[in-house]
Image (cartoon, rainbow, N blue to C red):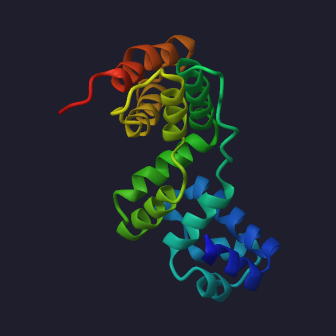
Amino acid sequence: MVEAVERARRLGSEREQAILRATYELLAETGFEGLRMDAVAARAHASKATLYRHWPTKAELVTDAVRACKAADGPLPDTGTLHGDLVAWFWDITRIIISEEGPLLAGVATALQHDSEFAVQMRQMRESRVPLAEIICERALARGELTPGYDARLIDEIVPALVFMRRFALGEPVDEAFIDHLVDDIILPLLTREPRP
């Protein structure tokens, strides 16, 4: 994050945003593998030398573009109950996945398997964020809805994968019945089960 602030100072915030937006748009059009620095330079009306001076690798440029351009997470739901928070948050996740960003993010996930440098960059970006699942579960713990020993990481492991699978692989709608099933039959039982010794 500090690097991004320094880069913005050297490059100019508007110029940096134009380059990152061009990168994100091309990422949606071509995928990670098909993205070329010369195409980004042409779309952003910048030189390749400028790109390479500020982002020595494609992995760094794309990671910054995803960080800057991905739809911002909305305010974290706070309905007063764990069940309500999970339902509201899973709808937020679903809206992103079924939007035009869904296929782009699926392509990014696929690229992580083929480009180790990109995988490292994206994982570092992810680790720098506060896990939303942990915040929701900590509030539930404070309300007495959960007991210590739950594993909030299960939410991030399971929910996006199941929504992607249902929407793209199975072609089924992500509807109220599916979200209720996800919360009531999968996530809540996992969060409230007895911790393993």
Q: Quadrant of residue 74?
A: top right
Quarter residue 6 falls in = bottom right
Tell me where residue 39 sits by quadrant: bottom right
- Residue 128 placement, left or right of 150: right
Q: Quadrant of the N terminus?
A: bottom right
Q: Residue at x 40, y 66 (%)?
A: 120
| Residue 26 appearing in the image | no
Give percent across and percent down for residue 117: 40, 70
Seen in the image, is 157 located left or right of residue 172?
left
Closest to the observer: 78 or 110?
Answer: 78
Q: Could you tell me which residue is drawn at 48 percent across and 45 percent down?
A: 106
> From where the camera sits, is residue 114 visible?
yes
Looking at the image, residue 38 lies above or below residue 140 = below
The correct choice, above or below, for 116 with respect to 46 in the image is above
29 or 107: nearer the viewer:
107
- Number of marks present in the image shown: 0
Q: Nearer the viewer, residue 49 or 13?
A: 13
Residue 4 % position (x, y): 65, 74
Q: Identify the residue shown where x is 50% and y is 61%.
A: 32
Q: Outermost residue toward the left? A: 197
Identify the image quadrant of the C terminus: top left
Residue at 61% x, 59% y: name it. 67
Residue 115 percent coordinates (x, y): 37, 65
Side (left or right) of 160 relative to 44: left
Q: Position of residue 79 (x, y in %)?
A: 65, 22
**Closer to us: 177 or 29:** 177
Q: Residue furthest top?
A: 177
Above or below, 47 against 13 in this view is: below
